[in-house]
């Protein structure tokens, strides 16, 4: 570790300002290049044939007619993807998800692919591929999938996490238990106990840009991939493993990204595009349709959760327990485990137990979605917390403050917390003007808390100073939310130069060492740390050049306000040398001036948020309008407050859509019925109020600037905050997300009965 | 030192929620854990995180572990 990562409470002149984003003009003028915007000479069009069945044996695939169609250059089926995974089950799941191997596991599962000279020919070729299916029984509901007699998705799956290990196949892939203390004893001490069950439906990240890539792979095993992704280094490693390539021979370049939110941390069609290219020996461009994005990429889990919490009359929780069932699609996942880990993380509990069950169903392979699994657990837990407060006659915010986790609390998932921000976010909510707004008829207010881990990981950064003093910062974390502006601010702060002097580039996989994917709210945290150290590395070089110029020991040189200054009375006659002056002389003082850093940026610091919202529910139609919404979250240190607020607002907006409208709807035939934005309704501007934000800055002790990740936590509380608000507005506890108009009307009618 | 095993990781130690291990760093601790519980290797290959006095480390194997530290072995977190 070349530099100390501890928080130092340094002062800032650039960090914390609201500068214009460097990619803004390109994006609003259409100059920015996204996944589908790259082209290559001689490129082919790739298309994928997908299963229309939820679960079926593929008894035969006849591609002969498609192969004979003029203009078709390659046709692939599962047989064209040999098993190179070396027994790695996780890799095999990815491979099988990219292309079915004898069995279609969900509606939309890829069964064949073609590359042709144009889209018309490719589409005709798909129609000429004859697939013979033998339909199998299917199951798409998480609760149905664990009932005795449910169709078994994989006969090789034995429930992990159970002792002794089971000997028969099950759709429960994994059981995960967390907690401490004695829940039964705790509940026995409670004066009031609330127990309730909840369901949430499956949602998609809803990124506007579909998956798209341009793949080139030659017979020598050298290739290039231009792709919309959150992690081009990870894509390179996974594609190389699946296709038997040397990592260094596959260059992956990330395009601008039109949203990812976790859905672009996984490969879907990219290995197929590369394999088509290898077979055709031509570049292949493969762009998913919206229908394909819904049916065949990774939405989040649908869930079924039971929660039980007990408390004393004085408002202190004595015990809490939850059982969480999350479906992971047709392949094993660990999504229920994350739900179990996060469910009670906001609270200081002596007796707590959460058990997660990851369940297989005939749906697409579930992928991460912004603080994956936490929103559904929070919906259930925060709903019961509200019910408990009401039963005790306590204000819901005061009840949460009384039970909030703090420094020294043993987290429900195990470790002891350091300095954390849940208490301060609740205090801020309590004192916020929003809470004083008077509610009208059919209106309700809801509050909820949320938690997410955040993490850092492997990071590698280069900083190069040009002879004119301009700075090129190359990072390997894809910019999904404005990180280029933040990282330029950090470089400018460290070097003491103007923000406008720094240009940040996302380097391809051949230009930097490995960088982990932009996930876990790590982009600005980890690349920010590496940028600080790379800049300090460059400052060391700048000081050496100044020392050499002055012919004094480097120990007598300090770096202040963007210039080298000679210390000591003996050096009073030496005028400062600015970065520009040193850079201009660099060709004759030792050559290029650069800084570099590779770091494992651990210690990301957990994150908490508290949200409040006011809603109005039309009792005739069941439609809900969000009247006011406020996000309070701890950012550690907001490098660029605009983009921190943007993350807060974006998470809340997605949560509002999830809470009120969005859901995958499967028919009895196991086919997805609403694979498009017309029938899968994400919120538009007219659905949303201005989302107010309040940034708290409780420094992360493990980052020089105190930064915590901010990208994910903001989606955790909305389902619960809106659930509590709607429940308060209609006088009936809402237990099923989304709280669409029919569900709200049904809840009101059922309550009347 | 005592190492708490969270979630599915305890299965690799025969269902124990807490085991005795040695190691001055996270890397040494994990080595000692695998020597005692070979089934743990599968989880290490898939990735784990180690919480030392509340700080979660996913990758840093050279991180020192102070005496009497509160040590938790956790499944590796994914993000979105």
Image (cartoon, rainbow, N blue to C red):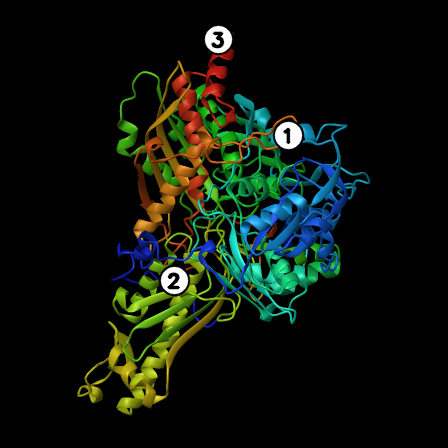
Reading the image, the residue beneath label 3 is: A752
SS at mark 1 in the image: loop
Q: Residue at x 26, y 32 (%)?
A: A433
Q: Quadrant of residue A356?
A: top right
Q: Nearer the viewer, mark 1 or mark 3?
A: 1
Reading the image, the residue beneath label 1 is: A141
Q: CA distance from mark 3 to mark 2?
A: 58 Å
Query: How far from the left and from the top, in percent, is residue A512?
Result: 49, 70
Q: Earlier in the sequence, mark 1 or mark 2?
A: 1
Q: Residues within 10 Å of mark 1 (few under 14, many from 20)?
A: many
Q: Evaluate whether label 1 is on the same chain as label 3.
A: yes
Residue A465 drawn above or below residue A508: below
Closer to the camera, B36 or A248?
A: A248
Q: Earlier in the sequence, mark 3 or mark 2?
A: 2
Chain of residue at mark 2: A
Reading the image, the residue beneath label 2 is: A704
Closer to the camera, A285 or A55?
A: A285
> Contact, CB < 8 Å: mark 1 with mark 3?
no
Residue A232 drawn above or below residue A424: below
Residue A43 drawn above or below residue A451: below
Label drawn at residue A691: none
Chain of residue at mark 1: A
Query: How far from the left and from the top, in percent, is residue A396?
Result: 40, 27
Q: Residues within 10 Å of mark 2 (few under 14, many from 20)?
A: many
């Amino acid at each position: 570790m070349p530099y100390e990562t501890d928080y130092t409470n340094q002062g800032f002149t650039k960090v914390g300002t609201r500068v214009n984003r460097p990619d803004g003009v390109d994006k609003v003028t259409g100059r920015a290049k996204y996944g589908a915007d790259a082209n290559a000479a001689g490129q082919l069009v790739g298309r994928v044939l997908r299963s229309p069945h939820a679960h079926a044996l593929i008894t035969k695939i006849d591609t002969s007619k498609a192969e004979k169609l003029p203009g078709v250059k390659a046709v692939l089926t599962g047989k064209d993807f040999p098993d190179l995974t070396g027994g790695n089950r996780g890799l095999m799941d990815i491979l099988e998800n990219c292309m079915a191997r004898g069995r279609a596991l969900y509606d939309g599962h890829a069964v064949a692919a073609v590359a042709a000279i144009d889209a018309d020919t490719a589409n005709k070729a798909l129609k000429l591929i004859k697939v013979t299916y033998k339909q199998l029984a299917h199951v798409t509901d998480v609760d149905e999938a664990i009932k005795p007699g449910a169709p078994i998705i994989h006969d090789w799956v034995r429930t992990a996490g159970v002792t002794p290990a089971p000997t028969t196949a099950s759709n429960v892939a994994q059981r995960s238990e967390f907690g401490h203390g004695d829940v039964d004893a705790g509940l026995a001490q409670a004066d009031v106990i609330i127990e309730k069950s909840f369901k949430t439906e499956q949602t998609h990240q809803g990124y506007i840009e579909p998956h798209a890539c341009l793949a080139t792979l030659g017979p020598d095993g050298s290739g290039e991939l231009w792709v919309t992704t959150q992690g081009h280094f990870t894509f390179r490693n996974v594609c190389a493993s699946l296709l038997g390539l040397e990592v260094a021979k596959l260059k992956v370049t990330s395009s601008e990204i039109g949203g990812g939110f976790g859905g672009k941390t996984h490969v879907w069609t990219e290995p197929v595009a590369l394999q088509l290219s290898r077979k055709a020996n031509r570049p292949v461009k493969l762009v998913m349709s919206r229908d394909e994005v819904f049916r065949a990429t990774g939405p989040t889990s649908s869930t079924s959760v039971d929660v039980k919490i007990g408390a004393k009359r004085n408002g202190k929780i004595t015990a809490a327990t939850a059982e969480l069932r999350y479906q992971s699609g047709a392949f094993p996942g660990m999504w229920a485990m994350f739900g179990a880990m996060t469910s009670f993380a906001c609270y200081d509990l002596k007796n707590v137990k959460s058990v997660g069950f990851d369940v297989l169903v005939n749906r697409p392979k579930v992928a991460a979605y912004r603080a994956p699994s936490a929103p559904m657990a929070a919906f259930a837990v925060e709903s019961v917390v509200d019910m408990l407060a009401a039963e005790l006659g306590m204000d819901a915010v005061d009840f949460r403050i009384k039970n909030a986790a703090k420094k020294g609390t043993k987290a429900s998932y195990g470790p002891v917390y350091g300095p954390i921000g849940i208490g301060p976010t609740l205090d801020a909510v309590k004192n916020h003007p929003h809470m004083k707004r008077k509610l009208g008829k059919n209106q309700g207010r809801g509050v909820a808390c949320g938690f997410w881990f955040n993490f850092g990981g492997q990071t590698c950064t280069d900083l190069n100073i040009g002879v004119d003093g301009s700075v090129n910062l190359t990072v390997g974390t894809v910019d999904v939310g404005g990180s280029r502006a933040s990282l330029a601010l950090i470089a400018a702060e460290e070097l003491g130069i103007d923000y406008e002097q720094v240009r940040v580039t996302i380097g391809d996989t051949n230009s930097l060492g490995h960088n982990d994917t932009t996930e876990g709210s790590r982009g600005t945290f980890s690349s920010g740390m590496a940028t600080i150290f790379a800049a300090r590395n460059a400052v060391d070089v700048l000081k050496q050049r100044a020392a050499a110029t002055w012919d004094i020991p480097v120990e007598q040189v300090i770096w202040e306000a963007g210039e080298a200054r000679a210390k000591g009375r003996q050096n009073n006659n030496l005028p400062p040398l600015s970065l520009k002056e040193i850079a201009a002389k660099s060709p004759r003082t030792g050559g290029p001036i650069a800084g570099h850093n590779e770091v494992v940026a651990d210690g990301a610091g957990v994150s908490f948020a508290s949200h409040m919202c006011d809603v109005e529910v039309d009792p005739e139609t069941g439609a809900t309008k969000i009247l006011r919404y406020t996000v309070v979250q701890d950012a550690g240190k907001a490098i660029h407050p605009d983009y921190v607020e943007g993350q807060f607002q974006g998470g809340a907006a997605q949560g509002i859509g999830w809470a009120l409208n969005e859901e995958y709807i499967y028919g009895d035939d196991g086919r997805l019925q609403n694979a498009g934005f017309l029938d899968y309704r994400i919120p538009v501007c007219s659905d949303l109020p201005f989302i107010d934000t309040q940034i708290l800055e409780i420094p992360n002790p493990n980052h020089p600037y105190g930064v915590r990740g901010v990208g994910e936590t903001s989606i955790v509380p909305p389902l619960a905050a809106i659930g509590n608000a709607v429940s308060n507005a209609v006088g009936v506890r809402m237990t099923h997300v989304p709280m669409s108009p029919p569900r709200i009307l049904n809840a009101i009618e059922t309550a009347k009965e | 030192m005592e190492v708490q095993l969270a979630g599915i990781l305890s299965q690799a130690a025969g269902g124990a929620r807490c085991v005795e291990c040695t190691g001055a760093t996270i890397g040494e601790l994990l080595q000692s854990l695998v020597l005692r519980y070979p089934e743990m290797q599968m989880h290490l290959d898939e990735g784990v995180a180690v919480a030392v006095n509340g700080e979660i480390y996913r990758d840093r194997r050279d991180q020192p572990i102070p005496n009497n530290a509160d040590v938790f072995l956790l499944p590796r977190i994914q993000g979105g």
